[in-house]
């Protein structure tokens, strides 16, 4: 997947798709099955088969493996295998033709609706709405009823009945594409509408269309067969799989094979087409990658029996690691994280995206996403959380440790009123809540908001929603609040209010706070101590003031140097070259060394430990920046 | 909410008008002479002229449409040539059994599909998930008419457990059997036909349901539910289920279209006395007024079910725009 | 005195609205921008600050010609946009470019970077193939888009790389004004610093005018000489950077300033 290739517009995507198809088991299975069915069907004229229409009443209903008739004969003595293969040819041809017709007409209509302005869109879509108001088989039936039975009419009817489906799907996709910034970018490049449709829209529509056609091909084969089954499609002596099934129905009790085999062939055809379609959907998505199999969470490392004994710490984390199952073994995303948090203390975890700060926070709650597992030791007031089972952990969550999410619009359940979510939270633990709902609402400053409990999350402003989320977190008077980028999605003025609220709540009730953020300046105002993370490790653990004025780790210094400060527009922004290593990427020695301006040869030999520097500070660096410099 | 319902009901009027126009136009734009098609080549010119007059074939079709609409307002759908009775009577007599069949199939399909989707999502990427996913794919690919035949063969012919035709046992009809006995008999007859449709509908619903459940299970708000210390039972049965239902509801509405259309096959196979079979017979007899009436009534039923599904979704998820 | 490069005159934008059938009557739309005047001189860096929903992105899109205004209009070099000749319109098109907040969605996922850049040059200029290639190389060298990136698809780029590609694309046609819509707010601090330095460099090198949209006053202070504060679709305060940030008058500007976290 590395991009060393020459720019070859157009052909690249196809090559990539083909390569991926080979790694997609479901798609391959579909392809193989389809080939298995199609090969004899396509080769039917080449095989020396009896004439499928030749009747021979003397040799009717012969069992399979009869001489000259591999699958036997039907009620008129016609060779079953020949009829199946020729019938399948008809079914596939009719289905494919109907799909192409419906796709072509539907795409043009959908494109016109999406691109042709509001009037045309309104007109076309009302028409589509009316056609979609029919159960689609009924529309096809009505058309056949009007035109009269026959294979061509059945095909036409099915194509027409599916046009609205294509029109609507294509319109939706094109509208999505139309709102993408790259369409605006093409306009900025001065391109006209035809070229934008041709070069920007169609290539992005093509995968969707191909996928729709594959899915629809299956239906169309089914529907054609259905109409023929009812006697409205293929007329004798011509036959497709559906009409064979319809004829065979009369002999169901005496000779079931005549009805069962055509249906089985239809099923095989449609299953293989659908399997292939599912595979195509993945393969055509440029963001898809072959799925990794995730293993069950690994048990806690026995070697890491906590060296921390009790102590005064509320939270003691020792050698915490988070791993993702990867194709080539576990990929460590967080490793060797150790820190302590005292009651009533506000500590921040700071780092850039992908450094593992959110995973660290979630692992304290045992809420890692699927596919991730954790090792190490997490002790809350001396009790080892890693040894707890699900029920015991659940009992702690919300009661002793609570969580304030980043984006409360998605983190509060959008389908339940705030009152319901408040109520269930208050009742989640047997001991009963620490506060009443009214007390909580007053605590977070939401008293006086009319109809608060009866409203849904989306009916609040961002700041109000975050207050609701904080109220839920406080319900059982937890000792520790974990706030994960809790103010990032908010406007600056609101952010300020929420920060003040968090600070006040922790101060008044001697509650500890672990505040995860990417914003150093922000956490400096809120927290006493800051943990700086880089590439899954804590690189510095220092009091906030000391960190801001005299960062010891070169990465902390670089972060500070890169942060613009209001009132210092001429401060030169220090630039860190390159980007952090990906999880699992091998880096010899210190993980920061490749980007570090102070790196020496030793740095690339061994990874430094998190060592004390002075009284209140831990640094993971062989050559920390000293006070003097 | 009541305002939303009123708005949606009002929006139905143009859609149903459009539906009737399409039905009428399709039937009227046929090449050839419908009267000739009905009576056959040996009909006398007098009889042909007579029939043309009864069917108002001498008028331009938009005018005939208006006349037909006017009749609809009085519940008059014209007179069936093949049955020699009013279309409305024939259609509404057959509507009940079709709704029973389609309703049972949709209910069964929705329950099976939702269960399959949820189980697969909860066992994501494990053997159960793969198995369910495969079963769901088979369901989507099954021809319902073939499935019906297989069920007849298995349960009717070979095992002999269940009746394979009609809606009720002949000797019960017209007797003063207890209602419970009667209903039980209808249920026995209902099982195979509704299952033939339900398994296919369950495939589609299960596929969408699995995707929806995976989305919901990975959503931030489910994580916050866990962080709040809610029990897994409550998270699954209240939060996840409602989220999945809200997403799957429109698909269930669309599947109503499949079961109502598919009823045509199934009623033919199981000799179910419903509207679908009436339609097939009407098409064979080229009885266009009967086809018109039947299609319009089924389309109306479909539109109503879809409306109900939309309303249910709106009730589940108040963010959905009242458009 | 020369005419300003781009002037927005009493620009308004209303979304939705219009007549409806049931219940019959006029429906009020949502007014995102309400009668804004804004002048950008040649070579000036103008900042537009405001919170989400204040209408700053809508205003920027109108300035770039990506969105029609509901009322009011634009002047390009002193001439109303409607009165421009065909050639002058092309010059406006080449002269105003836009950099989007999310660089990923601004790139067609099915086009390689090199092809996307080439498309832009084809649209804006009449260069032949060799000159286009040379121009892409030249701008690529200035923006850090090397040959290795040209062969990649957008999903193979990191956020910082994608934003560099977007900047390169904006500069290819030698624009006079670049509109930057929160160009660094999706990036981490270290990448943000790289891009901010790059933007300052490029402006000095090409004599560009910037319309810089952001919610971050510290970032804005570095890049802009003139700052406009926007709230609920209106400009509530404007002024030279130092005056506005040191002696803010409007209460909203004061609140914004007070909310900025400070180091130390």
Image (spheres, coloured by chain):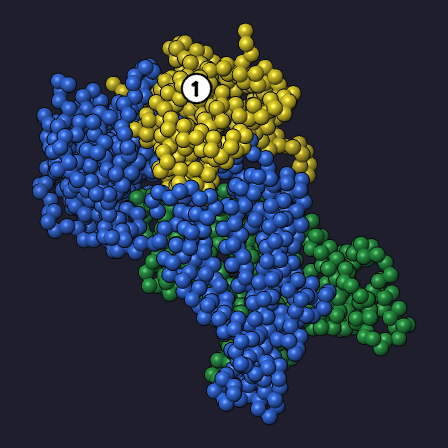
Q: Residue lying at the far right in this picture: please name it.
A: B46
| Residue in view at x 52 percent, y 49 percent | A206
Whether residue C31 is visible here, answered yes or no, is no
Judging from the image, what secondary structure is the residue with disc 1 in? Answer: helix
Residue at (49% x, 20% y) in the render? C176
Image location (x, y in percent) of residue A178: 54, 39
- From the rendered image, report the letter of the chain displayed in yellow: C
The quarter of the picture where the N terminus of chain C appears is: top right
Residue extending farthest bottom:
A58
Q: Which chain is blue?
A: A
Residue C193 in the image, given as x and y percentages of width and height? 32, 25
Establish if A472 lies above or below A19.
above
Q: Residue lying furthest top in this view?
A: C1
Question: Could you say where residue B310 lies in the image, as x and y percent from the top left?
Answer: 55, 51
Q: Quadrant of the C terminus of chain C?
A: top left
Decide which of A232, C120 is in the foreground and name it.
C120
Q: Is residue B132 visible?
A: yes
Residue on which the image places disc 1: C206
């Amino acid at each position: 997947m590395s991009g060393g290739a020459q720019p070859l517009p157009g052909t690249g995507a196809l090559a990539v798709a083909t390569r991926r198809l080979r790694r997609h088991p479901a798609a391959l299975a579909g392809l193989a099955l389809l080939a298995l069915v199609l090969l004899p069907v396509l080769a039917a004229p080449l095989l020396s088969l009896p004439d499928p229409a030749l009747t021979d009443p003397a040799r009717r209903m012969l069992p399979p493996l009869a001489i000259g008739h591999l699958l036997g004969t039907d009620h008129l003595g016609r060779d079953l295998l020949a009829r199946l293969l020729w019938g399948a040819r008809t079914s596939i041809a009719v289905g494919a033709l109907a799909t192409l017709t419906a796709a072509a007409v539907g795409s043009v209509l959908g494109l016109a609706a999406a691109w042709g302005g509001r009037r045309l869109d309104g007109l076309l879509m009302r028409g589509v709405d009316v056609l979609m108001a029919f159960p689609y088989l009924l529309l096809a039936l009505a058309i056949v009823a009007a035109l009269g039975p026959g294979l061509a009419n059945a095909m036409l009817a099915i194509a027409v009945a599916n046009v609205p489906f294509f029109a609507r799907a294509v319109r939706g996709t094109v509208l999505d594409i139309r709102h993408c910034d790259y369409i605006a970018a093409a306009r900025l490049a001065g391109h006209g509408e035809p070229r934008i449709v041709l070069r920007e829209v169609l290539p992005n529509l093509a995968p969707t269309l191909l996928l729709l056609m594959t899915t629809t091909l299956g239906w169309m084969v089914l529907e054609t067969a259905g109409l023929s089954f009812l006697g409205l499609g293929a007329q004798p002596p011509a036959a497709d799989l559906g009409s064979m099934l319809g004829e065979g129905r009369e002999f169901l009790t005496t000779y079931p094979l005549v009805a069962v085999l055509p249906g089985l062939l239809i099923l095989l055809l449609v299953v293989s087409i659908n399997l292939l379609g599912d595979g195509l959907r993945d393969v055509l998505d440029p963001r898809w990658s072959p799925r990794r199999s995730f293993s069950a969470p690994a048990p806690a490392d026995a070697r890491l029996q906590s060296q921390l004994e009790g102590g005064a710490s509320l939270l003691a984390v020792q050698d915490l690691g988070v791993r993702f199952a990867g194709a080539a073994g576990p990929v460590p995303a967080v490793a060797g994280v150790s820190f302590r948090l005292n009651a009533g203390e506000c500590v921040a975890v700071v780092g850039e995206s992908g450094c593992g700060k959110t995973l660290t926070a979630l692992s304290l709650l045992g809420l890692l996403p699927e596919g991730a597992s954790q090792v190490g030791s997490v002790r809350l007031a001396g009790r080892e959380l890693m040894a707890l089972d699900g029920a015991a952990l659940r009992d702690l969550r919300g009661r002793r440790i609570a969580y304030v999410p980043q984006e409360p619009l998605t983190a509060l359940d959008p389908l339940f009123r705030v009152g319901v979510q408040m109520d269930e939270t208050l009742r989640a633990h047997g001991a009963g809540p620490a506060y009443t709902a009214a007390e909580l609402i007053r605590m977070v400053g939401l008293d006086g908001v009319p109809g608060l409990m009866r409203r849904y999350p989306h009916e609040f402003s961002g700041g109000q929603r975050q207050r609701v989320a904080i109220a839920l977190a406080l319900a059982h008077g937890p000792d520790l609040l974990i706030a994960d980028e809790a103010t990032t999605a908010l406007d600056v003025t609101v952010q300020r209010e929420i920060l003040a609220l968090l600070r006040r709540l922790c101060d008044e009730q001697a509650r500890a706070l672990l505040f995860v953020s990417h914003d150093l300046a922000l956490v400096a105002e809120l927290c006493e101590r800051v943990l700086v993370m880089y590439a899954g490790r804590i690189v510095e653990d220092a009091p906030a003031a000391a960190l801001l004025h005299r960062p010891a780790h070169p990465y902390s210094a670089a972060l500070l140097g890169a942060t613009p400060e209001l009132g210092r527009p001429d401060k030169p922004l220090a630039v860190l070259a390159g980007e952090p290593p990906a999880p699992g990427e091998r880096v010899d020695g210190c993980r920061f060394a490749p980007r570090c301006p102070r790196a020496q040869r030793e740095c690339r030999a061994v990874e430094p430990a998190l060592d004390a520097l002075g009284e209140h500070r831990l640094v993971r660096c062989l050559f920390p920046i000293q006070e003097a410099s | 909410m009541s305002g939303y319902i009123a708005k949606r009901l009002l929006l139905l009027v143009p859609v149903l008008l459009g539906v009737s126009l399409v039905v009428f136009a399709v039937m009227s734009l046929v090449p050839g002479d419908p009267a000739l098609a009905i009576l056959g080549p040996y009909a006398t010119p007098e009889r042909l002229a007579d029939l043309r007059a009864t069917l108002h074939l001498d008028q331009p079709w938009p005018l005939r449409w208006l006349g037909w609409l006017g009749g609809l307002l009085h519940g008059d759908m014209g007179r069936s040539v093949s049955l020699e009775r009013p279309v409305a009577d024939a259609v509404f007599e057959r509507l009940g059994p079709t709704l029973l069949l389609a309703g049972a199939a949709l209910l069964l399909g929705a329950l099976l599909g939702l269960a399959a989707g949820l189980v697969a999502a909860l066992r994501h990427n494990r053997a159960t998930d793969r198995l369910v996913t495969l079963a769901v794919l088979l369901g989507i690919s099954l021809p319902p008419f073939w499935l019906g035949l297989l069920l007849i063969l298995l349960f009717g012919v070979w095992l002999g457990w269940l009746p394979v035709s009609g809606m009720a046992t002949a000797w019960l009809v017209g007797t003063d059997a207890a209602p419970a006995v009667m209903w039980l008999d209808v249920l026995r007859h209902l099982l195979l036909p509704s299952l033939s449709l339900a398994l296919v509908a369950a495939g589609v619903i299960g596929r969408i349901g699995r995707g929806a459940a995976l989305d919901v299970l990975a959503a931030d708000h489910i994580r916050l539910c866990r962080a709040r210390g809610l029990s897994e039972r409550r998270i699954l049965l209240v939060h996840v289920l409602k989220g999945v239902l809200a997403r799957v509801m429109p698909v269930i509405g669309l599947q109503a279209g499949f079961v109502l259309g598919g009823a045509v096959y199934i009623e033919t196979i199981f000799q179910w006395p419903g509207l679908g079979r009436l339609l097939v017979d009407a098409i064979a007899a080229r009885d266009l007024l009967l086809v018109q009436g039947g299609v319009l009534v089924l389309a109306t039923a479909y539109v109503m079910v879809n409306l109900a599904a939309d309303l249910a979704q709106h009730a589940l998820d108040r963010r959905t725009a009242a458009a | 005195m020369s005419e300003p490069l781009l002037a927005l005159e009493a620009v308004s934008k209303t979304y939705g609205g219009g007549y409806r059938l049931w219940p019959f009557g006029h429906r009020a739309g949502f007014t995102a921008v309400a009668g804004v005047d804004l002048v950008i001189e040649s070579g000036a860096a103008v900042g537009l600050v405001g919170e989400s929903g204040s209408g700053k992105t809508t205003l920027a899109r109108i300035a770039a010609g990506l969105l029609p205004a509901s009322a009011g209009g634009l002047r390009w070099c002193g001439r109303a946009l409607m009165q421009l000749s065909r050639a002058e319109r092309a010059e406006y098109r080449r002269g105003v470019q836009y950099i989007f907040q999310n660089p990923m969605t601004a790139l067609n996922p099915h086009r390689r970077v090199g092809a996307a850049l080439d498309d832009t040059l084809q649209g804006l200029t009449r260069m032949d193939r060799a000159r286009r290639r040379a121009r892409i190389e030249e701008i690529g060298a200035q923006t850090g888009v090397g040959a290795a990136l040209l062969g990649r698809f957008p999903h193979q780029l990191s956020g910082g790389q994608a934003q560099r590609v977007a900047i390169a694309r904006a500069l290819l046609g030698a624009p006079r004004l670049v509109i930057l819509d929160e160009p660094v707010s999706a990036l981490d601090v270290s990448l943000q610093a790289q891009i901010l330095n790059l933007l300052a460099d490029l402006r000095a090198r090409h004599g560009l005018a910037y319309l810089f949209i952001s919610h971050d006053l510290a970032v804005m202070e570095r890049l802009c000489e003139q700052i406009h504060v926007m709230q609920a679709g209106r400009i509530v305060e404007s002024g030279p950077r130092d005056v506005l940030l040191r002696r803010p008058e409007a209460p909203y500007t004061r609140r914004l300033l007070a909310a900025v976290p400070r180091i130390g």
